[in-house]
Image: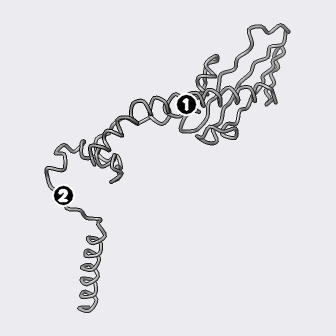
Amino acid sequence: MKKNLLNLITLLVFTIFFVNSCGLYKRSDIKDNPVNVDERVQRNIQEGRGVRFGVGAKRGGDFDFASSNPLWRGAVDVLDFVPLTNASYSGGIIITEWFSSENDTDNTNRELKITVRFMSNEIRADALKILVFEKSCNQNNCKTKKIASKLESELKLAILKKAALFEKDDFKKYKETKGKNRGKTLNKKN
């Protein structure tokens, strides 16, 4: 029993010694650290240290990623001609309501619904899957089916073009504002 306890204490001492010598523990002066907790947390996050679990006071969710994703913004912008039934960024899907063309000359009651599925956040051809559904009603009988249409490829191309433009604009804005400020910050540290 005493031998096991001695081995455990020895292991603990060596572990503390090695962890300390690896640089995991870094002594710091009080003047180097902000007094305010939120400032300290923000600084640690900016420096890439620490993890935030969201324990404590509840704050609203952060939806910055959805508004900064150019592919998502491009899809919402291209589909602005029709109301959306479901636009779930976390689910990676946009579904429109049933809509029909205003210049529907034939007497069939035909409506379309578009579904956009996001397979990736990258701007590339296989990042989107667009489905077009058709509902045609004759008197009391309505049929719904998935159709293959040129609209799918036209929408995909329009969304990808719009997303590429958004990404280009975002990069230009970043370069003009934060890119310049980052250079100044790095020079101050050196």
Q: Position of residue 72 (x, y in %)?
A: 57, 32
150 displayed left or right of 5: right
Residue 111 in which image quadrant: top right
Q: Position of residue 153 (x, y in %)?
A: 75, 29
Picture layout, residue 77 above or below residue 189:
above
22 displayed left or right of 84: left
Mark 1, residue position: 168
Q: Position of residue 47 (x, y in %)?
A: 33, 49
User: Which amino acid, by three-letter code, is at mark 1?
Assistant: Lys
Q: How is the image coloured?
A: one colour
Mark 2, residue position: 28
Q: Position of residue 21 (x, y in %)?
A: 27, 72
Sequence-first tag of 1 and 2: 2
Residue at 79 percent of width and 26 percent of height: 144
Residue 97 in which image quadrant: top right
User: Image quadrant for the N terminus?
Assistant: bottom left
Picture layout, residue 123 above or below residue 12:
above
